[in-house]
């Protein structure tokens, strides 16, 4: 998703108009002009749930790389099965290691958890195979969630363990003394055959990125369970993440050498597979006829909502004072929003003049000015009043003015913010419901 930092100055007044209290719109107009101020929430909306084939999960630009790397096989009671695996390169922490006359103790993969990155129920066993990549990755290329990389079939290590988010003691050996650390992590023992191979490399391999990656192309973290009730989230950018070689030097002192997931020059991306077969969501996917009933949104490379507003021509020539999209969270039988909480931040995207799907102008302005997306745009769950369901409201005033003026088309998409690393999902009531239907609320002035 492209979020441009270059925002036209003329768009800024529209933002501030969008932030205005709708009850005050037109309040300063002369009495003769007040008749030109209008409000409507009955504009026709066509809504449907659509499937996506992929999202970008690696970019050469550091600011566009993931923070949370999801892992596991998740059996969702509404959305079916999602499989999340991880491809990653590791890189030696030093270009001049000293492996002369050492004795190998162990080789372990340490994966710190990303704070708040897990989803669903994780207090059950998770299985992981660590496989060796059989083809090179290129740090200058983009990688997407539907891309697969060849691997060697024999695991470098395997484990089935129940995760704990509590801090765990970890003994590190830096310098001449042991350092006791406490943090939450997932640990996988690896075959020391790999350790012997790595310490046996000529020193030239450690001095050259390309030579090292030719010798050890990277790893795949592959889930081995048939399914869990949640997903794990790993922080591969952590300085504590990587493959640790523990050994004793020629004097018998304990030491370690780290092969880490340093953002430069390594590649790290997540691969997603979604299987909606037999799920509650399946009948609604790419079926506009059911969009009046329920709508489904999912993180990772999952489902999105497509909205079309066919009667925009009826607003030709008006000034949009405020445009707000309103959707209500559906309560489905068999769902459990305590275990599977809804998406905490939604955004709106739309095709630009080149046909590329980008964030709408309102969001670009907010992010460029470092304003609060939640406070200015909305897109967050809010408790409904008088017994009504949780509601999401999204401010699209600047964008909808462009729609009315014919600058952009009348198609919008609802998707999670930071979708590629977001595991959560939600279900909305559709556009044709007699109660809690999708609505576009407009306050406008006719010139």
Image (tube, rainbow, N blue to C red):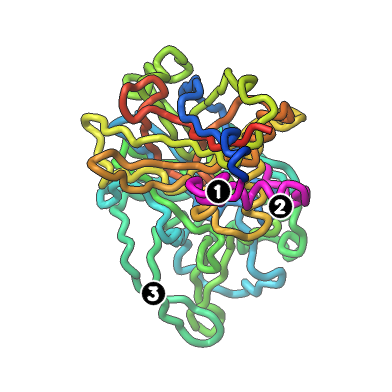
Q: Quarter-wise, where is residue 354 in the image?
A: top right
Residue under the image location 40 percent in, 38 percent down: 425
Residue 134 to residue 408: above or below: below
- Note whether residue 239 is visible: yes
Instruction: Identify the magenta region.
Output: 1-29
Lower position in the chain sequence, tag 1 or tag 3: 1
Residue 89 lies in the magenta-colored region: no
364 lies above or below 147: below
Q: Which mark is residue 254?
A: none
Q: Does 4 lie within the magenta span?
A: yes
Label 1: which residue? Answer: 27
Where residue 262 sits in the image (x, y, percent)?
Answer: 63, 61
- Which residue is nearer to you in this view: 209 or 33? 33
Q: Residue at x 28, y 53 (%)?
A: 162
Question: Is the residue marked by circle 1 packed among few (<14), some (14-19), or many (20+) residues within 10 Å?
Answer: few
Q: Residues within 10 Å of mark 3 (few under 14, many from 20)?
A: few
Label 3 element class: strand
Q: Nearer the viewer, mark 2 or mark 3?
A: 2
Q: Which mark is residue 182?
A: 3
Most extreme residue toward the bottom is 176
Calculate the distance from the C-alpha at mark 1 to the C-alpha at mark 3: 59 Å
Q: Is residue 218 visible?
A: no
Mark nearer the viewer, 2 or 1: 1
N-term-proximal mark, 2 vs 1 = 1
Residue 100: horizontal and vertical position, in percent? 63, 74
- Determine the residue positioned at 68% across, 55% down: 368
The mark that comes first in sequence, 2 or 3, is 2
> According to the image, label 2 marks what residue?
61
Q: Is residue 387 above or below residue 266?
A: above
């Amino acid at each position: 998703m492209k979020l441009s930092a270059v925002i036209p100055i003329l768009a800024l007044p529209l933002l501030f108009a969008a932030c205005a209290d709708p009850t005050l719109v037109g309040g300063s107009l002369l009495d003769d002009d007040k008749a030109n101020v209008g409000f409507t929430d009955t504009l026709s909306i066509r809504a449907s749930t659509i499937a996506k084939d992929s999202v970008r999960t690696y970019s050469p630009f550091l600011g566009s790389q993931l923070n949370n790397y999801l892992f596991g096989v998740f059996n969702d009671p509404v959305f079916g099965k999602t499989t999340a695996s991880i491809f990653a390169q590791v890189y030696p922490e030093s270009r001049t290691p000293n492996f002369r006359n050492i004795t190998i103790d162990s080789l372990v993969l340490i994966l710190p958890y990303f704070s708040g990155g897990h989803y669903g129920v994780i207090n059950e066993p998770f299985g992981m195979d660590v496989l060796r990549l059989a083809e090179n990755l290129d740090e200058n290329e983009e990688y997407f969630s539907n891309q697969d990389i060849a691997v060697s079939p024999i695991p470098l290590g395997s484990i089935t363990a129940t995760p704990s988010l509590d801090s765990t003691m970890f003994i590190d050996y830096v310098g001449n003394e042991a350092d006791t650390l406490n943090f939450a992590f997932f640990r996988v023992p690896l075959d020391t055959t790999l350790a012997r191979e790595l310490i046996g490399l000529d020193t030239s391999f450690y001095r050259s990125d390309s030579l090292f990656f030719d010798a050890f192309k990277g790893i795949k973290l592959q889930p081995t369970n048939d399914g869990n009730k949640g997903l794990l989230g790993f922080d591969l950018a952590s300085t504590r993440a990587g493959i640790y070689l523990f050994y004793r030097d020629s004097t018998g002192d304990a030491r370690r050498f780290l092969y880490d997931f340093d953002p430069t020059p390594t590649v790290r991306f997540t691969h997603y597979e979604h299987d909606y077969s037999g799920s509650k969501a399946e009948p609604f996917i790419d079926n506009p006829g059911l969009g009046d009933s329920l709508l489904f949104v999912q993180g990772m490379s999952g489902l999105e909502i497509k909205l079309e507003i066919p009667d925009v021509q009826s607003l030709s020539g008006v000034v949009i004072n405020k445009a707000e999209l309103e959707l209500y969270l559906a309560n489905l039988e068999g769902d459990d929003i305590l275990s599977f909480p809804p998406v905490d931040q939604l955004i709106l995207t739309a095709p630009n003049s080149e046909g590329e799907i980008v964030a709408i102008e309102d969001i670009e302005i907010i992010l460029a000015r470092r304003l609060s997306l939640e406070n200015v745009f909305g897109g967050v769950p809010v408790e409904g009043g008088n017994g009504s369901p949780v509601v999401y409201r999204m401010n699209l005033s600047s964008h909808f003015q462009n729609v009315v003026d014919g600058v952009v088309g009348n198609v919008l998409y609802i998707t999670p913010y930071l979708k590629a690393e977001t595991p959560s999902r939600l279900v909305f009531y559709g556009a044709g419901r007699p109660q809690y239907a999708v609505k576009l609320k407009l306050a406008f002035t006719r010139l």
